[in-house]
Amino acid sequence: MSGDYLYYTCAIVAVVLSGLAKGGFAGAGALAMPIMALGIDPVRAAAIMLPILILQDAVSVWSFRRSWDRHILKVMMPGMVVGVGLGYLFAAQVSETAVLGALGFISTLFGAQRLWIERGGKVVLPSSSPDWVGTLLGIASGFTSQIAHAGAPPFQMWVLPKRLARDVLVGTTAIAFAVMNWIKVPAYAALGQFTRANLMATAMLAPLAIGATYAGVLLVRRVDPARFYTLIYVLMVLLGIKLMVDAVVG
């Protein structure tokens, strides 16, 4: 019973964070999977979250369907497909403990990198970096997205330096990850994760996800983003370290 309470608590917090991310707090979504992994095995957690992300993607794509960069998608999407395939092979061939460790490592690395940038550090590529760099970062984005729904950092490394207009950036990102999340569906099906229990869990969480997305739209104008993101990234580092320790001890 205590395990059930832990799962439901983690799932609710994770879905709320994911909804806030789609509503405007972009960095919050990266914390969802580490929190879910505290209450349930990471592969199943990712399978429960995937349909929720697809539902939220539909709203984003519809809202920005006329504002996107064709060239960026042309360069990055092939790499994303390869990355998803590599992530599937990784999850299929290694133990749950290894996936937990990988999730912890990704979370710690991303959180630390974002804290570095928040403090004024710069780890970015020039806006003129060649297309093959974008393809490689697309592979990294697909891999981390398949393992932990954490494909944004590699994607942003190539796209943000290009200084796209706001709506074009949001629209391009929304379309890229909407397509990639659909690409992940066969991989999760092959892993046997779309069970009746998992889909029922998704259905129960879906209304909360939609409500949290609208809440994000309302709150993003009222909350100090600097303090909010600092807290999110610190928690990511701490949770990532805990997941890695659990993987080593377990």
Image (tube, rainbow, N blue to C red):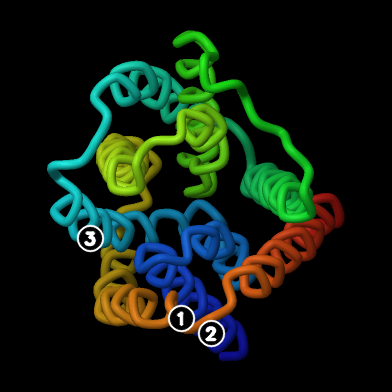
- Residue 44 visible in image: yes
Amino acid type shown at disc 3? Leu
- At 27% from the left and 44% from the top, the residue drawn is 171
Residue type, label 1 = Ile
**Residue lying at 35% horizontally and 54% vertically, measured from the top left:** 50
Where does the image place residue 65, in percent across and percent down from the top left?
14, 45
Q: What secondary structure is marked by label 1?
A: helix
Image quadrant where one finds the C terminus: bottom right
* Percent position of residue 161, x then y: 53, 31
Residue that label 2 marks: 9
Question: Which residue position holds label 3?
Answer: 55
Q: Is residue 225 above or below residue 105?
A: below
Q: Which residue is mark 1?
A: 12
Whichever of callouts 2 and 3 sits on the residue coming sooner in the sequence is 2
Q: Is residue 158 above or below residue 112?
A: above
Q: Secondary structure at mark 3?
A: helix
Q: Mark 3 or mark 1, which has the lower sequence index?
A: 1
Residue positioned 24% across, 73% down in the render: 203
Q: What distance separates the C-alpha of mark 1 from that of mark 2?
A: 5 Å
SS of the residue under disc 2? helix
x then y, percent, for residue 210 = 26, 75
Q: How many residues crowd mark 3 within 10 Å: few (<14), some (14–19), many (20+)?
A: some
